[in-house]
Amino acid sequence: MQKFSALALLRHAFGGHEGWRPQWRSPEPKGTYDVVIVGGGGHGLATAYYLAKEFGISNVAVLEKGWIGGGNTGRNTTIIRSNYLFDESVALYDHAVKLWEALSQALNYNVMFSQRGVIMLAHNVHDQQSLKRHIHANRLNGVDNEWLTASDAKAFCPPLNIENSMRYPVIGAALQRRGGVARHDAVAWGYARAADALGVDIVENCAVTAIRRGVNGALEGIETTRGTIETRKVGVVTAGNTSTVMAMADLRMPLESYPLQALVSEPVKPIFPCVVMSNTIHAYISQSDKGELVIGAGTDAYVSYTQRGGLHVPMHTLEAICELFPIFRRLRMLRNWGGIVDVTPDRSPIIGKTPVPGLYVNCGWGTGGFKATPGSGHLFAWTLAKDEPHPINAPFRLDRFRDGYLIDEAAAAAVAH
Amino acid sequence: MLLIDCPFCGKRPELEFRYAGEAHIARPADPSGLGDEAWGRFLYGRGNPRGMHAERWRHLNGCGRFFNALRDTTDDRFAATYKIGEERPMVAEPQGARKA
Ligand SMILES: Cc1cc2nc3c(=O)[nH]c(=O)nc-3n(C[C@H](O)[C@H](O)[C@H](O)COP(=O)(O)OP(=O)(O)OC[C@H]3O[C@@H](n4cnc5c(N)ncnc54)[C@H](O)[C@@H]3O)c2cc1C
Ligand SMILES: [Zn+2]
């Protein structure tokens, strides 16, 4: 692997920057692998990296039907935080935040993780009670989250409007200082490059089309658009397409796929110091290092695979943004897009085994899985390598929907991201 | 925004409607006789197909009534809307449906 450093930059500058090589190989798929990961998003690539790095399993392929990071990984608004309500969720998301903190060093790749703080606004008494309940629950779990008055929130984020004349005035906010953002593409590329260096084959333009099982029902291999592959272990990490892939093994999943939209403004000078979320009036905003305001809208109402959605959904969000930040009223929007998010009934992910021996699944991250990328990959790699879940992902098993052990973040009002 | 053909009122914009999930999931006839596996499937299992999807809508800000629809989830086009209790109409599966 060509190491990135200030010295390397200098050295290549003398060669006119012509000497840089591609960051990962582009191999033909082999006929057999120890483990095949389906889906080359951040979660799939991270899984492959940790399989090779932590568990010594490097005869691994990541199969991606398009290009790596072209799914939700490259479409999301990159909000990272761990201040969820339930103990199981806090353990899961904070495991990821701890890995984020050391990730650029570990991968020798700048993922631009920036702990600029995430504030979640309260607009009514219910919001205030719910956010304070989260704050107390988080503190019991040793995770930072603090209450801000409206004027504290304004001091932390000066563009915020806290006038009482607003339709839904800001009455306070919860702040997680360790929360923030990261560069989505860099996360996919950094993991791909590091996994490739450890021997993992990253195969793009390769869609899985069938799952083969033996007479005893156990997994024997898969069919792809680039040939048959024999393997005893497959990890499916295909986000919005999980129901379709799992249907190849005759499994009906507790998942629905919805379009989720986002948009960015024209770039402006640095003005926005943190991340602001409002679940109640539905708006999420931060500023990228390129200067664009990155704005997250809601999901469309119906299941779909179109990767677009109705214009009224982002319009609704922009109305809220203009009310919260009147200073942005005359900004123009540059791009709007959608991703397909896989939503579970309790809005918590599924990471673990399936009824088919040899088939594992990591899905259901819905509208908020980017923040979990390193932790999800690490825990899924553990599960694949040891054939049993890590204690952190054990509660997130598929059969909780049979047994009734839901982890109901949906009801806990942490609705998104 | 979708234009939805309510079987009672005709074509109206999506904002008048509320989506109500997958259609034709029948409530178990004998709930107390059902095991955990079957309950789990009934409550939470969804087809979520890439292709033609039978789904319920409610014309909330109109006649207020529920009805069913067939819509292709690969391009969001409706193939049919029909009243509750009516059979799912036969329509051709769209090209490329169910492919991952
Ligand atoms: C608009 C938007 C905003 C979001 N904002 C946030 C946010 O602020 N914070 C946050 O934490 N999360 C956010 N999310 C959610 C987050 O993006 C996802 O949970 C996360 O990126 C999922 O990562 P993944 O690797 O599982 O999926 P993906 O990146 O979607 O990767 C799955 C891959 O599987 C591939 N695939 C599918 N089918 C097949 C097949 N048959 N064969 C081979 N490959 C296949 C796809 O091409 C895709 O590349 C947002 C999502 C969207 C859409
Ligand atoms: Zn009507």
Image (cartoon, rainbow, N blue to C red):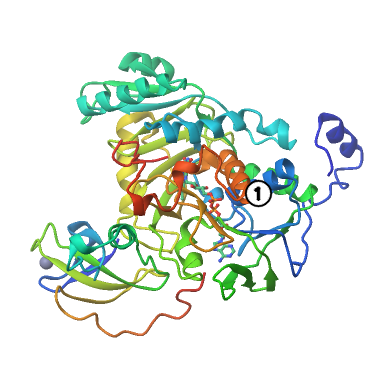
Q: Quadrant of residue A413?
A: top left
Relative to A159, residue A186 above or below: below
- For this view, does A200 lie left or right of residue A71? right
Chain letter belonging to callout 1: A
Give x and y (percent) for residue A308: 42, 59
**Residue B84 spot, x, y in % from top left:** 14, 73
Where, by quadrant of the figure, is residue A100 drawn?
A: top right
Counting labels gives: 1
Quadrant for the N terminus of chain A in the image: top right
Decide which of A115, A203 is in the foreground and name it.
A203
Q: Is B75 placed left or right of B66 in the picture?
A: right
Q: Looking at the image, can residue A158 be seen?
A: no
Q: Which residue is mark 1?
A: A385
Residue B76 can be seen in this image: yes
Q: Is mark 1 within 8 Å of ligand 1?
A: no
> Which sits in the foreground, A386 or A202?
A386
Q: Residue A355: horizontal and vertical position, in percent?
A: 48, 61
In this picture, residue A157 sits left or right of residue B18 = right
Mark 1 packing: few (<14 Cα in 10 Å), some, or many (20+)?
some
Image-based side of A113 in relation to B44, left or right: right
Q: Is residue A64 above or below residue A280?
A: below
Q: Secondary structure at mark 1?
A: helix
Q: Residue at x 73, y 42 (%)?
A: A53
Q: Residue at x 41, y 50 (%)?
A: A261
For the C terminus of chain A, which image quadrant? top left
Query: In the image, what residue type sits under mark 1?
Result: Ala
User: Which x, y percent locates residue A127?
Assistant: 26, 28
Q: Residue at x 61, y 63 (%)?
A: A66
